[in-house]
Amino acid sequence: MPVLTINMIQGRTLDQKRSLVDEVTKAVCKTISVSPDRVRIIINEVPEDSYAIAGELMLDKNNKG
Amino acid sequence: MPVLTINMIQGRTLDQKRSLVDEVTKAVCKTISVSPDRVRIIINEVPEDSYAIAGELMLDKNNKG
Amino acid sequence: MPVLTINMIQGRTLDQKRSLVDEVTKAVCKTISVSPDRVRIIINEVPEDSYAIAGELMLDKNNKG
Amino acid sequence: MPVLTINMIQGRTLDQKRSLVDEVTKAVCKTISVSPDRVRIIINEVPEDSYAIAGELMLDKNNKG
Amino acid sequence: MPVLTINMIQGRTLDQKRSLVDEVTKAVCKTISVSPDRVRIIINEVPEDSYAIAGELMLDKNNKG
Amino acid sequence: MPVLTINMIQGRTLDQKRSLVDEVTKAVCKTISVSPDRVRIIINEVPEDSYAIAGELMLDKNNKG
């Protein structure tokens, strides 16, 4: 512990993921006083046709533009 | 909030997903009195070799029938 | 399958939960063609001090208003 | 999106939670370029009798030490 | 990794939880060849008014019988 | 119920998955007294660039060694 899951829309670069897990881990360690090796993060990349706000898929929202 | 996750077996069409998130969002708004833009849905499509009932993968269950 | 998780802020009545699972189940069955007994729903009631938007706990957001 | 879930052992103070969601949100925004109001965080506080490492409950691990 | 979440109806004893995490960890280690200290399990105890099958809360199902 | 989610690094064989769900289901049934047909397992295979320990992606950890 802590174990984090980050759901985000598909398509970030590998470098963005590297920075994301690095910075989020630091934020967790700093604020709730755990050592970094205790922090686990699972990234779940969600396709645009599998995420909806207000009953509308992100895919359709983006195509409206 | 609310944030919903829907785990379902892979293979529905895009139109089925569209109807799914639309109708589920309406059901949530109607019953717990939230506005639609507050409702977020993440669909998780699970492959047949990654879901099991009674200790048997869906893949093997379907190949028997 | 399908297995749904509904995260929502704590405090709905039992009758609201009853309607919620009833209507959401119907919405799922109607749109992706599964029989009702296949649908499972887990409600996760999140306390106001455990949900944040834009880096602010719901508890603090509500106390401002 | 993004939607984060943070599972952590029960018992942090309200101020720790405040800092946690604030700092984690900033880390997410900075690294994957989203605006803060898009970031949602659900904290799940896990009791010591409901988390295990290596097949042993945290409760029992802590009582040994 | 692996990180497991076990959702189950509230009410098991502490000893049942102890056996559960012990046996499940062994089953994971044996079948996918990981060492026990890599296995983490989060138990999520779901109240009877927060779990539904076929659109009916477990609470109501049990009160019928 | 129970509903289990198993997050593990991508790359196990189909036979490993078969054994995993079989043995884990037995472990659950034995320890908390449920019948096998009540047990549902969702496997979530996480790519090496989507899992981090101590702020470092598994992908980078493995490439060092």
Image (cartoon, coloured by chain):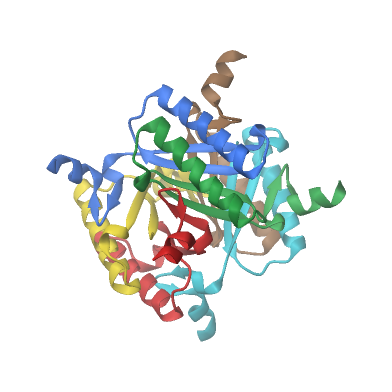
Chain colours: A blue, B yellow, C red, D green, E cyan, F brown
Query: Which residue: 50% across, 85% down?
Result: E64
Q: Quadrant of residue E52?
A: bottom left
x and y, in percent, of residue D20 in the image = 55, 46
Q: Is residue F32 above or below residue D55?
A: below
B45 sits to left or right of E46: left
What percent of the width, then of the height, locates residue F10? 50, 31
Examine the image and state in which quarter residue B19 appears.
bottom left
Q: What residue occupies the far front of the structure in this picture?
A: C64
How far across and down, in percent of the image, does residue B3 sit? 39, 56
Residue A25 visible? The answer is: yes
- Name the residue furthest right: D64
**Which quarter of the image is occupied by the C terminus of chain C?**
bottom left
Residue most extreme to the left: A64
Give above or below for B23 relative to D57.
below
In the image, D46 versus B6, the foreground residue is D46
Q: Residue at x 45, y 79 (%)?
A: C14
Q: How many marks on residues?
A: 0
- Please state which of residues E23 and E17 is positioned toward the viewer in this rendering: E17
Res. F43 visible in picture: no
For image coordinates 41% across by 58% down, the residue present is C4
Q: Identify which residue, F18 or A24, lies in the foreground.
A: A24
The N terminus of chain C lies in quadrant? bottom left
Vertical placement of residue A8 versus E20, above or below: above
Q: Nearer the viewer, residue F37 or E59?
A: E59
Judged left or right of residue F65, residue D48 is: right
Q: Which residue occupies the extreme top position in the image?
A: F64
